[in-house]
Image: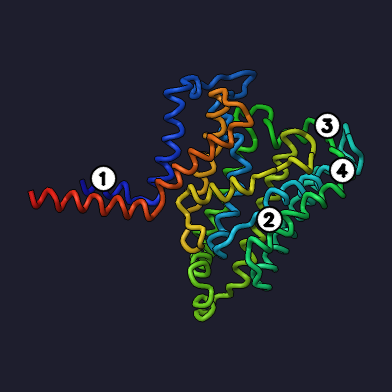
């Protein structure tokens, strides 16, 4: 009994249970969901599709987790910043043309431009939140609204195509490697972030500032700089996600690239068992949350649910999952068990 209690009290227990619940649906409804095939040295299957398509969301969820932990607010501009970063990358590589069959600038220059845009956007959000003390949702609403408009100005309202095989590799496969490239990018981002948080005191500083910024200042922590850095890092993650998004379709459509991904990123943080009020956080929990969301989406597609109905079913399942992790529900369940225990003793 004590062993079971220890397992259920584990921080990642509920996020893992939620992911297992979604996967269990496929055992019942879509047995072929777990089938993996090899074609031309490349792995295919629903599971591969889940870990592949979740890559951008995992990267965004990593940045969102730190933002939420440090400021108790969310960055709702990550989708628009991804689109803007992708637009800048494609514009640089295509030399301003609508379609290019060869690079007009070195590939690394396009990547650096996209990353720089992400960093600048993140720094702008960080300045507004940390220095100007504007509420996070209001501060990031600026780029949420203007980001795609700026991207449209850069692309002149047109889709820009970069029809170069090398450009497609970041969003597809590298020759000789069976797993999609985005999977490795997501793993690298998660591992480097974990390394930064575990090998330095930054993780502890972020939690301290998130719990009580005023108290953190009193003990000598620069809460303004810490919040600023988390938003800047979130912008960096958005830039990386934007590179993958554009590479998948070797083009940029500023209206649709990264659309609504900010909502899924926030939801991934919540599903990971993290409080949206700031403070203590679990990066791995957010990663599990991101895979849960993608697994749910892929499951619905595998069950032949029409695309326009997917948000409805998705919302229902998400409400159930979030409710299961609700502290109030846990308290009610605990009180219920105590009452049963008291009743047995009286009998």
Q: Residue at x 10, y 51 (%)?
A: 345
Which of discs 2 and 4 lies nearer the camera? The answer is 4
Which one is earlier in the sequence, the residue at label 1 or at label 3? 1
Which one is earlier in the sequence, the residue at label 1 or at label 2? 1
Q: Distance between the residues labelled 4 and 1?
A: 57 Å
Label 3 belongs to which residue?
Answer: 163
Q: Position of residue 96 (x, y in %)?
A: 91, 43
Q: Distance between the residues labelled 1 and 3?
A: 55 Å
Kindly state the secondary structure of the residue where label 4 is placed: loop
34 lies left or right of 150? left
Whether tag 4 and tag 1 are in contact, CB under 8 A, the answer is: no
Up-down: is 261 above or below 47?
below
Tell me the number on the disc at residue 338.
Answer: none
Which of discs 3 and 4 lies nearer the camera? The answer is 4
Tell me the number on the disc at residue 235.
Answer: 2
Whether tag 1 and tag 3 are in contact, CB under 8 A, the answer is: no
In which quarter of the view is residue 58 placed? top right
Q: What scheme was used to colour the molecule?
A: rainbow
Q: Can you name the residue that lies furthest to the bottom here?
A: 218
Q: Distance between the residues labelled 3 and 4?
A: 19 Å
Which of discs 4 and 1 lies nearer the camera? The answer is 4
Which of discs 2 and 3 lies nearer the camera? The answer is 2
Q: Position of residue 39 (x, y in %)?
A: 62, 18
Label 4 belongs to which residue?
Answer: 157
Viewer-proximal residue, 137 or 347?
347
Label 1 belongs to which residue?
Answer: 4
């Amino acid at each position: 009994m004590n062993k079971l209690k220890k397992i259920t009290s584990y921080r990642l227990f509920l996020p893992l249970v939620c992911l297992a619940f979604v996967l269990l649906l496929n055992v019942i409804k879509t047995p072929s969901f777990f089938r993996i095939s090899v074609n031309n040295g490349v792995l295919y299957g629903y599971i591969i599709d889940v870990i592949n398509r979740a890559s951008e969301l995992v990267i965004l969820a990593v940045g969102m987790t730190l933002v939420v932990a440090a400021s108790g607010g969310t960055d709702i501009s990550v989708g628009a910043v991804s689109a803007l970063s992708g637009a800048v990358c494609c514009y640089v590589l295509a030399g301003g043309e609508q379609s290019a069959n060869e690079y007009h600038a070195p590939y690394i220059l396009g990547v650096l431009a996209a990353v720089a845009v992400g960093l600048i956007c993140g720094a702008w959000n960080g300045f507004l939140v940390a220095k100007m003390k504007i509420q996070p949702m209001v501060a990031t609403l600026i780029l949420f609204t203007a980001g795609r408009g700026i991207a449209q100005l850069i692309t002149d309202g047109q889709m820009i195509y970069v029809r170069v095989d090398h450009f497609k590799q970041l969003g597809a496969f590298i020759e000789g490697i069976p797993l999609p490239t985005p999977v490795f990018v997501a793993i690298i981002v998660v591992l480097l972030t974990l390394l930064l948080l575990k090998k330095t005191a930054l993780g502890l500083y972020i939690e301290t500032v998130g719990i009580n910024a005023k108290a953190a200042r009193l003990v000598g922590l620069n809460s303004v700089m810490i919040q600023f850095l988390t938003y800047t890092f979130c912008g960096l993650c958005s830039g990386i996600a934007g590179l993958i998004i554009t590479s998948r379709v070797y083009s940029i459509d500023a209206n649709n690239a990264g659309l609504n991904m900010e909502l899924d990123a926030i939801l991934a943080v919540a599903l990971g068992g993290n409080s949206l009020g700031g403070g203590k956080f679990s990066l791995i929990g957010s990663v599990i949350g991101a895979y849960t969301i993608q697994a749910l989406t892929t499951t619905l597609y595998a069950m032949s649910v029409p695309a326009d109905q997917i948000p409805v079913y998705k919302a229902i399942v998400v409400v159930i999952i979030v409710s299961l992790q609700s502290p109030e529900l846990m308290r009610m369940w605990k009180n219920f068990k105590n009452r049963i225990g008291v009743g047995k003793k009286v009998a």
